[in-house]
């Protein structure tokens, strides 16, 4: 028997297809496979029977051929989702973030993009295309060699994440446990990490203000935790991701870079994160949304940029974007794009 828990979370499309071929081969040789995934397309592609769990209990088992995506979502969440992806507001005219000719030797080449207030720009591409590397440069984690950045029309130079935070930029990295959260610290401490100078007076940290602020966002984002003193390592993946988002809400970020914001969280939490992203756009936040899930990029973006080999190679308005056209641009098959 082979048990696989989210085996494709860090795999490219081609690697996922190779894995599926191997799994079908071992299944044909009599190996029993328990395949655990939040990605429903994978379940339908592989499974003979589907068992749905919710809150630690089995709620249904049914043949895969008789199941529908909507039925599984309803079983997983315990309610009907009128809209799995939130409605998007119309963006404002003013440009929040503009990047001109940004390059980093061997990594990024001549990146030019803009994001308006209230706009969600999706960034698609295969693993290794340079999406995460671009996010890290924009937030000051990694340096760039040439190029220009403007925030609200003013030229800026971002050398460190501290510079980015001062300019109102927040960053949700793709690996929340290794790159975003301090797992042994409490929810309140993780929420207020960028705000330590603001929450200090005469060199003394004001823990009461920290607690009040953290509690506000725990309630606003419906983070399921016994208290703001709970260690964040003890929360579910979806609630950990909400803590990361709460951090940048508390910092009142005007620009948000979201790298795989729904990776590894369940369907219900994913819908809540989508709603939160749309609400932030409605408040005028400019959002760069990086995701390997094409349905998410297509449904949650006003515009989609596609990267390949460190370059932006295509741009599609939402009305013209399809999975086929985005994949064609990501892989370089121009004939499929037409």
Image (cartoon, rainbow, N blue to C red):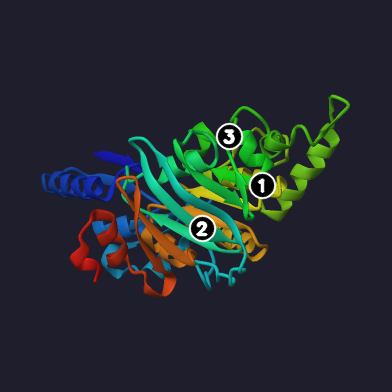
Label 1 crowding class (10 Å Cα cut-off): few <14, some 14-19, many 20+?
some
- Kindly report which numbered mark, 2 or 1, lies closer to the viewer in this rendering: 2
- Using residue 111 as the reference point, say whether residue 120 is left or right of it: right
Q: Give the residue at x 34% y 49%.
A: 311
Element marked by disc 2: strand
Residue under label 2: 114
Element marked by disc 3: loop
Q: Position of residue 151 (x, y in %)?
A: 61, 51
Residue under label 3: 181
What's the distance in space between the residues labelled 2 and 1, CA to CA? 16 Å
Which of the marked residues, 2 or 1, is nearer the chain's N terminus?
A: 2
Q: Is residue 223 above or below residue 279?
A: above
Q: Position of residue 198 (x, y in %)?
A: 79, 36
Q: Position of residue 324 (x, y in %)?
A: 27, 66
What's the distance in space between the residues labelled 1 and 3, CA to CA? 19 Å
Image quadrant for the C terminus? bottom left
Q: Is residue 95 above or below residue 175?
A: below
- Using residue 331 as the reference point, say whether residue 220 is left or right of it: right
Q: Quadrant of residue 44?
A: bottom left
Label 2 crowding class (10 Å Cα cut-off): few <14, some 14-19, many 20+?
some
Which of the marked residues, 1 or 3, is nearer the chain's N terminus?
A: 1
Question: Are circles 2 and 1 on residues that touch, CB within 8 Å?
Answer: no
Q: Is residue 107 visible?
A: yes
Camera-nearest residue between 87 and 220 = 87
Q: Give the residue at x 62% y 27%.
A: 184
Disc number placed over residue 168 in the picture, else none: 1
Q: Give the residue at x 36% y 69%.
A: 321
């Amino acid at each position: 028997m082979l048990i696989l828990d989210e085996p494709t979370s860090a795999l490219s499309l081609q690697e996922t297809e190779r894995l599926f071929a191997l799994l079908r081969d071992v299944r044909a040789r009599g190996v029993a496979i328990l395949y655990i995934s939040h990605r429903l397309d994978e379940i339908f592609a592989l499974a003979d029977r589907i068992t749905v769990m919710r809150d630690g209990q089995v709620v249904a088992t049914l043949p895969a051929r008789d199941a529908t995506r909507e039925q599984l979502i309803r079983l997983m969440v315990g309610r009907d989702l009128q809209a799995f992806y939130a409605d998007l507001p119309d963006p404002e005219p003013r440009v929040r973030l503009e990047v001109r000719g940004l390059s980093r030797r061997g990594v990024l080449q001549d990146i030019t993009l803009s994001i308006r207030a209230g706009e969600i720009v999706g960034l698609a591409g295969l693993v290794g295309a340079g999406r995460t590397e671009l996010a890290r440069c924009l937030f000051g984690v990694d340096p760039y060699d040439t190029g220009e950045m403007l925030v609200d029309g003013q030229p800026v130079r971002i050398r460190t994440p501290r510079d980015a935070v001062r300019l109102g930029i927040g960053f949700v990295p793709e690996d929340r446990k290794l790159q975003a959260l301090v797992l042994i610290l409490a929810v309140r401490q993780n929420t207020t990490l960028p705000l330590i100078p603001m929450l200090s007076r005469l060199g003394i940290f004001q823990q009461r203000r920290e607690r009040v602020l953290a509690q506000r966002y725990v309630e606003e984002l419906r983070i399921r935790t016994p208290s703001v003193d709970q260690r964040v390592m003890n929360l579910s993946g979806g609630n950990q991701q909400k803590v990361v988002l709460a951090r940048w809400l508390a910092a009142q970020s005007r620009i948000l870079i979201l790298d795989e914001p729904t990776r590894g969280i369940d369907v219900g939490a994913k819908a809540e994160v989508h709603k939160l992203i749309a609400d932030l756009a409605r408040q005028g936040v400019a959002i760069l949304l990086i995701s390997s899930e094409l349905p998410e990029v297509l449904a949650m973006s006003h515009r989609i940029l596609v990267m390949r080999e460190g370059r932006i190679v295509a741009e599609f308005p939402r009305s013209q974007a399809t999975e086929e056209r985005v994949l064609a641009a990501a892989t370089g098959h121009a004939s499929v794009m037409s």
